[in-house]
């Protein structure tokens, strides 16, 4: 047969099974059908009476040599091969026993695959089952029509041979091949399928004709068989030329489409998915990822497309250690593949972070600094090594992206997107009125501080501040004045803490203060007293001045063996704040971790600073 099935690293398809699992199941079904044919209708079939006969080892050698003469055709990024194996099959139908022909064909083609690319169990299994099915259909059609007893050159014999090769090579083979690719990838492109089918038909027809020519010489003048060498070489050269011409056209079309996307990327999220999907198809991978660094120091933006999907997922975070090491490794290399390195190298770590075994990376080189890198992972065809042409194409695409990042519309789109993400993050974690942290960011910061406590052994405290008299000011002077008061309070609170502490607006007229890494437990009470005093000062608002107070609850953690959850620490501070209000407001209360609320209420006077005279 002239084509071989692809294989893939595991990846998700349309069904719950991975593509490689579906391919193995499909190959097993083909194998079962082939076995049923060989053990059923073909069980007792024998070689037709003919003057043409060759030993089994010659047929095996011919199948092996023919499988080494091949061209590659790409179907949606997946390579399939067209070889000259129909020639020894056409001869073998007359010259050897059908069961011997099956063994010679399967063994010869398999040895050819191993010679070209090494052993790949999943791919070899799929090819083995497909070859068995191909030979079963070929022999079944050939024996059903029946060769003439007059010899292989009789009209009936030629008709049986042509029909067998046509059904197997024009119908069964292409259908099985494309169905296997569909199960593997979940999608087929009609244009590529038609192109590959035409190559298949031409190759099968040409090889069958050469096989008939070989029979002519073998039946009459075997010593003239050497004259087949020039036409076979010409056919192979023509196929190679056509294949290379098509690959060159594919590369040019890919580069043109890539340039068009990069120069019209006003909506970078949409076009990034289209760009990465095109790369996945061109290079035959299941995952493509673009890592962009808008600033030399700052978060990187990652666009990821899997399964050829035109929509990319977007995330933003600092570069990981493996990504930084990979960028360093790419300083002196054009393209680095993970399979070329030992398991502990930066590339292996980079792809291990993404849960894949094999892939290639290329840097996006700028004039002054790296712009990021492009990752291609999960090769669908089982070929773990890029060809030199593929490496050159990948470097060219990386250069196009680098230029677009530095000077083209993509640069502006990336910067705009980065600014939008920063703005969304600011809105998510900061209070829009006072521009200080909100409850979400405050709770997260408290959690991080408590996590560090066992190692730092420095006390951590939270202050829960509730303004006294704010509602009356808001009702009397309006919300505009109330907003100004809240801004003034936020400014005053920030002035009472260290740079690495935090002030947050928890909601309404409630504020929180995080004191991280204090030297002594009593430091929290000192800060709380300063806050009480600063809140008493009148707030000038143009022609008027208003005054508010504050009831403050303090919760301190200094025992590394008994660290509460962030919400629990805030709850303790909240309880202490309510106790401060019960005791007359304008004061602070420290939560007693060794007692329950009733005891705290009883001992409130002992923990409350006396109000000023």
Image: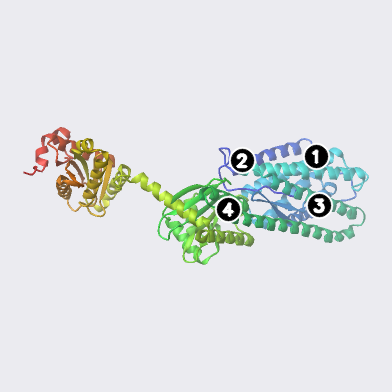
Of discs 4 and 2, which sits in the foreground?
A: 4
In space, the residues marked 1 and 3 are separated at their CA atoms by 20 Å
Say whether disc 3 or disc 2 marks the residue closer to the N-terminus: 2
Res 23 quadrant in image: top right
Most extreme residue toward the front is 543
Of discs 4 and 3, which sits in the foreground?
A: 4
State the residue in front, 24 or 475.
475
Circle 1 residue: 140
Q: Is residue 90 visible?
A: yes
State the residue in front, 546 or 467.
546
Secondary structure of the residue carrying numbered label 4: helix
Instruction: State the mark number for residue 207.
Output: 3
Q: Eyeballing the image, is 60 above or below 469? A: below
Secondary structure of the residue carrying numbered label 2: helix
Say whether disc 4 or disc 2 marks the residue closer to the N-terminus: 2
Secondary structure of the residue carrying numbered label 1: helix
In space, the residues marked 3 and 2 are separated at their CA atoms by 32 Å
Of discs 1 and 2, which sits in the foreground?
A: 2
Circle 4 residue: 261
Say whether disc 4 or disc 3 marks the residue closer to the N-terminus: 3
Res 603 quadrant in image: top left
Quadrant of image for the C terminus: top left
Q: Relative to residue 324, is residue 177 drawn left or right? A: right
- Badge 3: residue crowd in 10 Å (few <14, some 14–19, many ≥20): many
Of discs 1 and 3, which sits in the foreground?
A: 3
Q: How is the image coloured?
A: rainbow
Of discs 1 and 4, which sits in the foreground?
A: 4
Whole-percent x, y for residue 40 in the image:
76, 35
- Badge 1: residue crowd in 10 Å (few <14, some 14–19, many ≥20): many
In space, the residues marked 1 and 4 are separated at their CA atoms by 51 Å
């Amino acid at each position: 047969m002239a084509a071989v099935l692809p294989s893939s690293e595991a990846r998700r398809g349309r069904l719950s099974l991975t593509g490689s699992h579906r391919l193995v199941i499909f190959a097993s079904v083909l194998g079962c059908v082939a076995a049923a044919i060989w053990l059923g209708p073909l069980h007792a079939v024998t070689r037709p009476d003919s003057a043409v006969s060759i030993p089994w080892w010659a047929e095996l050698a011919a199948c092996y040599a023919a499988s080494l003469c091949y061209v590659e055709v790409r179907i949606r990024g997946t390579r399939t091969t067209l070889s000259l194996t129909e020639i020894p099959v056409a001869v073998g139908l007359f010259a050897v026993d059908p069961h011997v022909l099956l063994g010679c064909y399967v063994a010869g083609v398999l040895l050819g695959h191993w010679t070209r690319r090494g052993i790949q169990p999943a791919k070899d299994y799929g090819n083995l089952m497909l070859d068995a099915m191909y030979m079963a259909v070929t022999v079944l059609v050939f024996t059903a029509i029946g060769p003439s007893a007059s010899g292989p050159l009789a009209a009936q014999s030629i008709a049986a041979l042509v029909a067998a090769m046509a059904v197997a090579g024009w119908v069964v083979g292409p259908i099985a091949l494309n169905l296997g690719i569909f199960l593997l990838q979940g999608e087929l492109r009609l244009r590529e399928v038609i192109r590959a089918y035409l190559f298949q038909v031409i190759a099968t027809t040409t090889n069958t004709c050469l096989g008939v020519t070989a029979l002519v010489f073998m039946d009459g003048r075997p010593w003239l068989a050497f004259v087949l060498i020039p036409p076979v070489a010409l056919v192979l050269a023509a196929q190679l030329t056509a294949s290379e011409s098509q690959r060159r056209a594919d590369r040019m079309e890919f580069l043109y489409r890539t340039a068009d996307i990069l120069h019209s990327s006003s909506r970078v999220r949409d076009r990034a998915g289209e760009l990465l999907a095109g790369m996945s198809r061109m290079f035959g991978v299941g995952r493509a990822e673009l890592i962009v660094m808008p600033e030399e120091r700052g978060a990187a933006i990652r666009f990821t497309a899997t399964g050829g999907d035109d929509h990319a997922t977007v995330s933003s975070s600092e570069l990981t250690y493996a990504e930084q090491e990979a960028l360093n490794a790419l300083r002196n290399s054009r393209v680095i593949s993970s399979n070329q390195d030992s398991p502990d190298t930066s590339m292996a770590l980079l792809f291990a972070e993404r849960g894949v075994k094999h892939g290639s990376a290329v840097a996006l080189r700028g004039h002054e600094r790296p712009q990021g890198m492009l990752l291609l992972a999960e090769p669908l065809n089982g070929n773990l090594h890029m060809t030199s042409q593929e490496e050159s194409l990948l470097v060219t695409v990386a250069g196009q992206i680098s230029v677009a990042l530095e000077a083209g519309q993509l640069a502006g789109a990336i910067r705009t997107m980065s600014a939008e993400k920063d703005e969304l993050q600011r809105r998510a974690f900061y209070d829009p009125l006072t521009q200080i942290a909100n409850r979400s960011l405050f709770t997260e910061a408290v959690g991080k501080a408590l996590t560090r406590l066992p190692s730092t052994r420095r006390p951590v405290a939270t202050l829960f501040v509730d303004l006294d008299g704010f509602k009356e000011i808001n009702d009397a002077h309006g919300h505009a004045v109330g907003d100004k008061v809240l801004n003034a309070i936020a400014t005053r609170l920030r002035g009472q803490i260290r740079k690495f502490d935090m002030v947050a607006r928890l909601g309404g007229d409630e504020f929180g203060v995080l004191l991280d890494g204090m030297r002594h437990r009593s430091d929290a009470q000192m800060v709380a007293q300063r806050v009480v005093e600063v809140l008493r000062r009148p707030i000038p608002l143009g022609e008027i001045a208003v005054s508010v107070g504050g009831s403050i609850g303090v919760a301190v953690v200094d025992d590394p063996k008994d660290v509460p959850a962030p919400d629990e620490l805030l709850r303790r501070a909240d309880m202490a704040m309510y106790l401060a209000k019960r005791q007359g407001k304008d004061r602070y209360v420290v939560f007693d971790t060794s007692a329950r609320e009733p005891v705290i209420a009883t001992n409130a006077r002992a923990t409350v600073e006396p109000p000023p005279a």
